[in-house]
Image: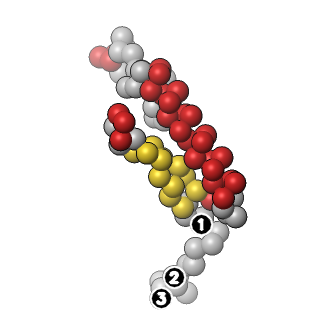
Amino acid sequence: MSDLKKLKNPIEKFKGVGISPDLPPKERDEIKRMLEAAKKAHVENETDSVENYRFLVVGRGPRRKVIKVKKNNPSTQTRTLTSDSL
């Protein structure tokens, strides 16, 4: 869905094709609630900012769970110098 903006000028062959999310509205709402609850729990229990993490819902049906992945911040990464860059 993030690349949907690329379809502003579609190819004639695909002009009548519509794009929609693959989850029913109830499931999308459930995922949103799960993400909000995980972020709230993170704020209450952790010292790091929520912006430093990416929260993802994985699994299907009743086995769904939220995982937390630390974001890579380009400003904190060290740059490796090579002989070409000197």
The answer to which of 24 and 46 lies nearer the viewer is 46
Tell me the kind of residue under disc 1: Pro
Disc marking residue 56: none
Q: Are marks 1 and 2 in contact (CB under 8 Å)?
A: no
- How many residues crowd mark 1 within 10 Å: few (<14), some (14–19), many (20+)? few
How has the structure been colored for display? secondary structure
Tell me the kind of residue under disc 2: Thr
Which residue is disc 3 drawn over?
A: 83
Residue 20 in which image quadrant: top left
Position of 19 relative to 1 (above/below): above
Nearer the observer, disc 2 or disc 3?
2
Which residue is disc 1 drawn over?
A: 74
Percent across and percent down for residue 24 are 42, 21
Q: Looking at the image, can residue 67 be seen?
A: yes
**72 sits to left or right of 48:** left
**86 sits to left or right of 10:** right
Instruction: Say which element carries label 1.
Output: loop
Residue 32 in which image quadrant: top right
Percent across and percent down for residue 58 are 39, 45
Pick whichever of labels 1 and 3 is earlier in the sequence.
1
- How many residues crowd mark 2 within 10 Å: few (<14), some (14–19), many (20+)? few
Which residue is disc 2 drawn over?
A: 80
* Disc 2 to disc 3, C-alpha distance: 10 Å
